[in-house]
Image (spheres, rainbow, N blue to C red):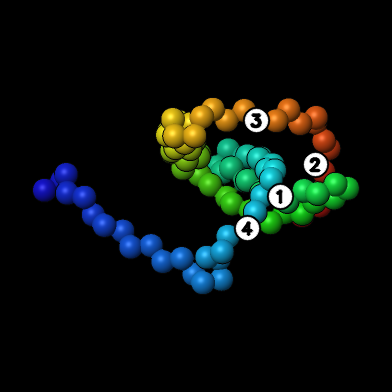
Amino acid sequence: MGNEKKELKVRIPESIQSGVYSNNAVVAHTREEFIVDFLMTAPPSGSVVSRVILSPGHVKRLVNTLQANLKKYEQSYGPVTPMEIPPVNMGYSG
């Protein structure tokens, strides 16, 4: 009885179904949470397009899920080689 899988029905509100594009991210953390600001940068400026606040446990699960999915992606499409981007001062006011 304890090993039964439960189905979770997730609804995506229409207002966010199309998503947002991000080409950069800034991560900060406190003892209790991680704050991930997704940015769209186009020099000479950029803006935060989404902020996600996560518990440390959820960050760990997300990292594991992303690593597993990246591995599957690379098996299908070949290795991903990130571009070397010079460090940029990402200071912004929130």
Residue holding disc 1: 39
Residue at the spot x=70%, y=43% of the render? 24
Q: Nearer the viewer, mark 2 or mark 3?
A: 3
Q: Amino acid at mark 1?
A: Leu
Does label 2 or label 1 sit earlier along the sequence?
Answer: 1
Instruction: Tell me residue 8's x, y (percent).
Output: 31, 58
Q: CA distance from mark 2 to mark 1?
A: 10 Å
Does label 3 or label 4 sit earlier along the sequence?
Answer: 4
Question: Which secondary structure, mark 3?
Answer: loop
Instruction: Tell me residue 67's x, y (percent).
Output: 47, 32
Question: Which secondary structure, mark 2?
Answer: loop
Q: Amino acid at mark 4?
A: Val
Q: Nearer the viewer, mark 4 or mark 1?
A: 4
8 to the left or right of 28: left
Residue 57 seen: no
Q: Amino acid at mark 3?
A: Pro
**Front position in the image: 84 or 28:** 84
Q: CA distance from mark 3 to mark 1?
A: 17 Å
Residue holding disc 2: 90
Does label 3 or label 1 sit earlier along the sequence?
Answer: 1
Tag 2–tag 1 contact (CB < 8 Å):
yes
Query: On the image, which quarter does residue 31 sit in?
Result: top right
Residue holding disc 3: 82
> Is 13 placed above or below 26 here?
below
Residue holding disc 4: 20
Q: Nearer the viewer, mark 2 or mark 1?
A: 1
Instruction: Tell me residue 50's x, y (percent).
Output: 64, 56
Q: CA distance from mark 3 to mark 4?
A: 21 Å
Residue at the spot x=65%, y=30% of the render? 82
Query: On the image, which quarter does residue 7 sit in?
Result: bottom left
Does label 4 or label 2 sit earlier along the sequence?
Answer: 4
